Amino acid sequence: MPASAEPLAKQLFGAKKTPSNQQPAPYGGYAKGCQAGAVELPETGPTWQAMRLSRNRNWGQPSTIAFIRDLSAFAARQPGWKGLYIGDISQPRGGPMTSGHRSHQIGMDVDIWMLPPQRLDLSRKQRENISSISLRRAKGAYTNNSWTRQHHEILKAAASDPRVARIFVFPGAKVRMCNDEKGNRAWLRKIRPWWGHHYHFHVRLKCPRGARGCVDQAAPPAGDGCKDAQQWVNNILNPPPPDPNAPKPKKRREYVLSDLPKQCAAVLQSR
C-alpha cells in the first residue's frame, strides 16, 4: 500500500485507549516513535495531579513516572507549592498525537505547569477548566511578576537530575536563571530556550539504559548556554530583518505507520 493510502499514524495511535500488553520500551525518537508497556501516572498522588484527563495523555515509561514522583516531592517542599500539576506525557501507546505536540511520542517527555498548586483535590471537571499561568513578559524576553525563586529551584532540581536530557522554557526564563544563579552553573546547560513554554516547562528524559530501540537526542552544546539565550532575547526585543532569500518553510508531512520504527506495528496490534 502506498504511504499516501495508509491511515495517518495519529489516527491509529489516538484511537488506542489502553497501553500495549508488552514489556516497557520506547521505540524511535521523541518526535517519531511509539511506546510499549506504558505506565499510567495516577490521576492524583501525594504531591501531584494529572491535568486535562480527557486527553488520556498521562502515560509514560516507568522512568518518566518515577521522575515525576521524585520532582513533585521536591516541589512540595518549596514554600507555597503543594507539589506539581502535570500536563501531557504521552498517549497510552505513544505515537503521533491527534492534536498538539510533534514530540511526546515515546513516553519520555512531560509538560509541567508553571502554576503553583495550592490544592491537590481538584475534580476531573476542575482539571479541565483550570488554567496554568504565563510567566513571560515582552513576548518572552523577560519573566513577569509571577516568576518566583521556587520556579528557579524546581527547574534547577529537574535539570540536575541525571535522567534528564534537556528542559525547554521560554528565553526570558533561561536568561533570568542565568543571571540569578550564583552557585554551580553546570545544570544550566540543560535549560534550553524555545518558543512558547511560558505556561509550562517541558522536560525531556534520556533513553533508559538498555533501551536499544530508543533514539536519544544529541546532547546540548557545551557550556551553560547563557550567551545564546541572551541572543534569543535580543532578537525578540530587536527582531533582525527577514532574509528575503530564505526558503519558504515546507509543510510537514503527516506520518503513517510505515514511517515509524518497525516495532510500532506490534505495539498497535498488542491487546
Image: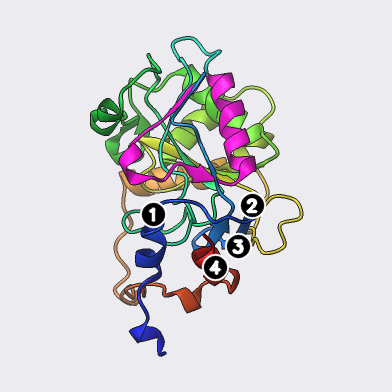
Nearer the observer: mark 3 or 2; the answer is 2
Nearer the observer: mark 1 or 3; the answer is 3
- The label on residue 264 is 4
Instruction: Indicate whether residue 54 is drawn in magenta.
Output: yes
What amino acid is labelled 4 in the image?
Answer: Cys
For marks 2 and 4 on the same chain, the one whose residue lies earlier in the sequence? 2
Quadrant of the rendered image containing residue 52:
top left
Nearer the observer: mark 1 or 4; the answer is 4
Percent of width and height locating residue 21: 58, 55
**SS assignment at label 1:** loop
Q: CA distance from mark 3 to mark 2?
A: 10 Å
What amino acid is labelled 3 in the image?
Answer: Tyr
Q: CA distance from mark 3 to mark 4?
A: 7 Å
Up/down of 2 relative to 124, above or below: below
Percent of width and height locating residue 254: 36, 72
Quadrant of the rendered image containing residue 270:
bottom right
**SS assignment at label 4:** helix
At label 4, counting other C-alpha atoms closer than 10 Å, the crowd grade (few under 14, some 14-19, many 20 or more) is many
For marks 2 and 1 on the same chain, the one whose residue lies earlier in the sequence? 2
Which residue matches tag 3? 27
Q: Can residue 180 be seen here?
A: no
Which residue matches tag 2? 24
Q: CA distance from mark 1 to mark 3?
A: 17 Å
Q: CA distance from mark 2 to mark 4?
A: 13 Å
Q: CA distance from mark 2 to mark 1?
A: 22 Å
What amino acid is labelled 1 in the image?
Answer: His
Is 163 left, or right, of 156 in this rendering?
Answer: right
Which residue matches tag 1? 101
Furthest residue in direction bottom, as rendered: 2
